[in-house]
Image (tube, grey):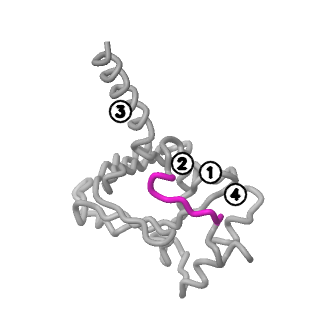
């Protein structure tokens, strides 16, 4: 009897804990679905499907430093239609917007656009302005990754919205 109870308890504990992992962020638009799955062992899977572009499925490792998520891809590039596309390490600021974790890209230069920030301060001012937009909630999950599954507190538990310093602005 005790053996069955013990086995049942172990199965329950394993299934209860496994539901929190992986931690999944997603952004979805009319033309694409992009999913970032973070595992608690420090690995990730980045998968993108688009009706106008290539399917992207890369893996790698990540770290969280302060409130920045840094993705390091397994390979330096990938090929698509005879083009070699370099993979730079992605960095995102981890924010909290009305109880939902959001990943905001922290690149100073956005390729194929005229967007360039000359300093970290300029970039942070832009992030604060975006965060305070009236339509920011509509952009979470479409323009910026929003948490869709898993328990992100297993990896990060910041109590601020943008950062302790910038929450005051």
Q: Is residue 83 above or below residue 28?
A: below
Label 4: how many Cα within 10 Å (few below 14, some 14–19, many 20+): some
Instruction: Kindly report the distance in space between the C-alpha atoms of the residues bearing marks 3 and 1.
Output: 26 Å
Real-space CA distance between mark 1 and mark 4, rounded to the nearest whole angstrom: 12 Å
Residue 80, x across and y down, in percent = 26, 54
| Residue 40 position (above or below residue 159) | above
Question: Helix, strand, or loop for circle 2?
Answer: strand
The mark closer to the camera, 4 or 3, is: 3
Residue 9's quadrant in the figure? Answer: top left
In the image, the segment drawn in magenta is 153-161
Q: Which residue is mark 4?
A: 136
Q: Name the quadrant containing residue 115.
A: bottom right
Compared across the picture, whether 110 is left or right of 169 comes to left
Identify the residue position indicated by label 2 in the image.
147
Q: Element at badge 4?
A: helix
**Does the CB distance between marks 2 and 1 fall below 8 Å?**
yes
Give percent across and percent down for residue 103.
53, 59
Which residue carries the number 3 mark?
A: 14
Q: Is residue 160 magenta?
A: yes
Residue sitting at x 59%, y 85%: 121
Q: Kindly identify which residue carries mark 1.
A: 100
The spot of residue 98 in percent (x, y) is 70, 53
């Amino acid at each position: 009897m005790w053996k069955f109870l013990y086995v049942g308890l172990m199965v329950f504990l394993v299934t209860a804990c496994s539901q929190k992992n992986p931690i999944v962020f997603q952004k979805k638009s009319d033309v694409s679905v992009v999913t970032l799955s973070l595992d608690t062992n420090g690995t990730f899977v980045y998968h993108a499907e688009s009706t106008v572009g290539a399917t992207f499925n890369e893996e790698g490792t990540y770290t969280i430093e302060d409130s920045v998520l840094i993705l390091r891809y397994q390979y330096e590039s990938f090929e698509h239609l005879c083009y070699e596309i370099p993979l730079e390490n992605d960095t995102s600021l981890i924010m909290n917007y009305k109880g939902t974790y959001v990943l905001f890209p922290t690149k100073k230069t956005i390729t194929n656009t005229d967007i360039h920030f000359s300093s970290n301060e300029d970039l942070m001012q832009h992030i604060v302005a975006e965060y305070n937009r009236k339509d920011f909630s509509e952009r979470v999950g479409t323009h910026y990754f929003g948490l869709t599954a898993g328990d992100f507190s297993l990896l990060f538990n910041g109590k601020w919205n943008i950062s302790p310093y910038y929450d005051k602005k």
